[in-house]
C-alpha cells in the first residue's frame, strides 16, 4: 500500500532530524552573543552613536538581543533597525520575483557607527548587499559586521568584525541558526545539502 503524502512528509521530517548535527546550543549562543556585545562596546569605546541593523530574517532578533545586552552593560539604549536587502542582491535576476519586506530605521544612519547583524556569514554576498543598502540610506561614520556563525568559503573580500563561532564546513552542507523568536528554540545545526534548505541564512547566497 503506497504511503500517503502525510506519511511521506513525516518520514522526511524524521530523516532530517536524524541527519542534523547540533553545533551550538542555546546556552552557547547566549555566551557568544554576550561576548560579541562586549567586543562591540570595546571596539567603539561605548554605545554612543551606535545603531544595530539586523539583516532579515534571523539577524533581526539577534540584533535585538545584542542591543538588550549592551543596554544591560552600559545602561544606555541602543537603536535597533531592520534591513531588507532583497533589491541589492546580485542574484535577483536568477531567482525571479522575490517578496519584499520593510526596512525600518529607528534613526538616520548618517554620522553613526552602524553594526550590521546576521546569523551566518558564508560567501559574503549578502553582507555586500547589506552594505550597499546602508550606503543608499545615508553616510554612516563606519559600517561593521557581526555574525553569530562564520562558516568560511568567502567569494568576496569581506570579513566580520565580530564572530560568535567559526564553523568549518563543506560547501554541500547547510548551517541553520534557529532562534526562539522565529523557530521556537535557540540552536545551531548542520545538515547535509539533501536536507531542507528552507531556513538557511540569506547570508549564504
Image: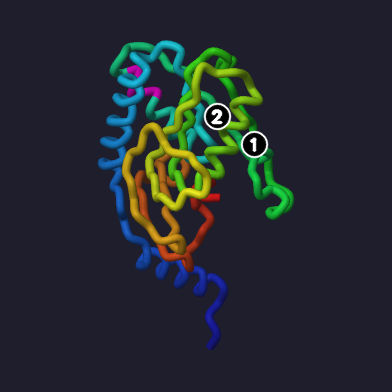
Residue extending furthest toward the bottom:
1
Q: Examine the structure image and report whether residue 69 is included in the region drawn in magenta.
A: yes
Residue at (26%, 41%) from the top-left corner?
A: 27
Q: Main secondary structure of the magenta part?
A: helix
The region drawn magenta spans 67-71
Residue at (34%, 54%) from the top-left corner?
A: 168
Q: Which mark is residue 39?
A: none
Q: Are marks 2 and 1 in contact (CB under 8 Å)?
A: yes
Secondary structure under badge 1?
Answer: loop
Distance between mark 2 and mark 1 Cα atoms: 9 Å
The answer, for residue 203, to whether it is visible in the render is: no
Q: Is residue 93 left or right of residue 45?
A: right
Q: Is residue 77 left or right of residue 9?
A: left
Q: Examine the structure image and report whether residue 191 is included in the region drawn in magenta.
A: no
Q: Mark 1 highlights which residue?
A: 101
Secondary structure under badge 2?
Answer: strand
Q: Quadrant of residue 171?
A: bottom left
Q: Is residue 95 left or right of residue 131?
A: right
Q: Mark 2 highlights which residue?
A: 82
The answer, for residue 11, to whether it is visible in the render is: yes
Residue 183 position, x and y percent, is 44, 46
Residue 123 position, x and y percent, is 50, 48
Residue 67 position, x and y percent, is 40, 23
Q: Quadrant of residue 174?
A: bottom left
Residue at (50%, 52%) from the top-left corner?
A: 199
Amino acid at each position: 500500500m503506497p504511503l500517503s503524502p502525510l506519511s511521506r512528509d513525516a518520514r522526511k521530517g524524521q530523516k532530517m532530524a536524524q541527519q542534523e548535527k547540533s553545533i551550538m546550543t542555546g546556552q552557547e549562543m547566549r555566551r557568544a552573543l554576550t561576548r560579541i556585545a562586549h567586543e562591540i562596546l570595546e571596539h567603539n569605546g561605548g554605545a554612543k552613536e551606535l545603531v544595530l541593523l539586523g539583516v532579515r530574517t534571523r539577524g533581526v532578533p539577534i540584533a535585538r538581543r545584542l542591543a538588550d545586552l549592551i543596554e544591560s552593560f552600559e545602561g544606555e539604549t541602543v537603536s535597533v533597525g531592520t534591513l531588507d536587502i532583497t533589491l541589492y542582491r546580485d542574484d535577483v535576476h536568477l531567482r525571479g520575483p522575490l517578496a519584499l519586506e520593510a526596512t525600518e530605521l529607528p534613526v538616520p544612519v548618517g554620522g553613526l557607527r552602524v553594526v550590521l547583524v546576521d546569523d551566518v556569514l558564508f560567501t559574503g554576498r549578502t553582507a555586500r548587499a547589506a552594505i550597499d543598502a546602508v550606503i543608499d540610506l545615508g553616510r554612516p561614520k563606519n559600517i561593521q559586521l557581526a555574525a553569530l556563525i562564520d562558516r568560511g568559503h568567502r567569494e568576496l573580500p569581506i570579513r566580520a568584525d565580530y564572530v560568535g563561532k567559526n564553523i568549518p564546513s563543506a560547501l554541500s552542507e547547510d548551517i541553520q541558526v534557529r532562534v526562539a523568536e522565529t523557530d521556537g528554540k535557540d540552536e545551531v545545526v548542520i545538515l547535509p545539502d539533501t536536507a531542507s534548505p528552507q531556513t538557511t541564512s540569506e547570508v549564504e547566497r
